[in-house]
Image (cartoon, grey):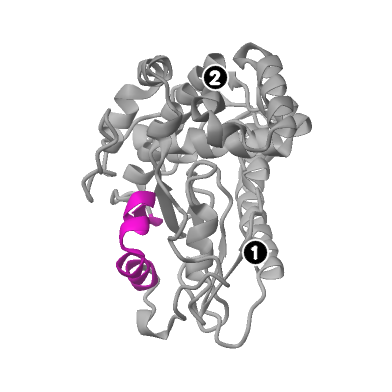
Amino acid sequence: MPPSAAEPGLFFIRGSPRSGTNWVGALLNLHPHISCAGEFHLEHIFNAKHQIQALRWQLVAQEPVRSALDRAFQNMLRECIEAGCPGNPGTRWMGDRTPREMLDICPGGSFFWIVRDGRDVLVSWTRHLLRNGPELIRVVVPEHAGRDAMLSLAARLAADPCLFETDPPALLSVEPWVRFFAGAWARRWRSDSGCAAYFDSPGSTSRVLRLRYEALVADVESERANMYRFLDLDPSLAMPVSRQTRTTPACRELTWQAYFSDANRRAFMQQAGAALAEAGYAADGAPAPADAVRPEPHAPERTTTASSGALSTASHPARTCSPAHPSPAAAAASQPRGPLPGGR
């Protein structure tokens, strides 16, 4: 929702884990009228609210209680973000940078959706998992996706911290994990793109700015200027990017090719090749066109569970975003869903 004389506006940064949500938040924080503090993960409460409201015999699914619960959630959303974001008298926008799925969590809100090549996301997320050790792997990687093999690989990395520098393909040597993640990334892409398409439609009061990680790396100044303008702010007031603020594109390399074996390329493309093409990414990793992140709406096909990151074929009841008979895009925007594996 936009700012007013009484309170700052709210914005939300969304994208897959390791796709640049933290970087976008840091870039926005360079502007004196913006405060973006961290990850609130309020989608868990949002999903629970709509799951119980979908049970029409429940009191909270009937008016006037239903509307009262909706208002209470929106008030809680604002209070939490305002409490978590350090502000000053000049703050006009406060934001949440949770790397989770696109949802119409705040009707009238402003959303930044950042997309990154799923193969680079896999490389970055796998390195993160292995560096953080067994506890995170046990939470994120299901048994059928190669959990035991990932635990063994983490032990190898602990014994040899330079393992992936001397043997890059070892990073993705657990093929069941590659396949699992690729499928999850593809489903997230289609779900998020459907929500973004709904935000563009006349039936939505929310709006979205599409960002591409690779474009940020190539021209961070132009991209961040567009981000400030999206919030009706003057880009010239923002501080410069710097290493101190962790906002420079230095060391943000796009290196998935170095880690993928031919077998892994085939495995990933089997699970996510169509979604990569829809997102504008070529099979050989060629740069995507600037306008590629504008697909047709897709309703989500499956969900992921928030507790373990495992994919589930069960669908959750959807909240309508329009008064009656929502379009597939509206259903995608309001469908309670879970994160990609691990969701951070």
> Residue 83, located in which quarter of the rendered image?
bottom right
- What span is colored magenta in the figure? 205-229
Q: Residue at x 45, y 60 (%)?
A: 250
Report whether 294 appears left or right of 101.
Answer: left
Residue tagged by mark 2? 173
Q: Which mark is residue 315?
A: none
Marks 2 and 1, how far apart in space? 40 Å
Quick one: label 2 or label 1, which is nearer the N terminus? 1
Q: Name the quarter where the C terminus is drawn.
A: top right
Viewer can see residue 317? no
Q: Amino acid at mark 2?
A: Ser
Residue positioned most to the front: 166
Percent x, y of residue 166: 54, 32
Eyeballing the image, is 36 above or below 121? below
Which secondary structure lies at badge 1?
A: helix
The tag on residue 81 is 1
Q: Nearer the viewer, residue 74 or 278?
A: 278
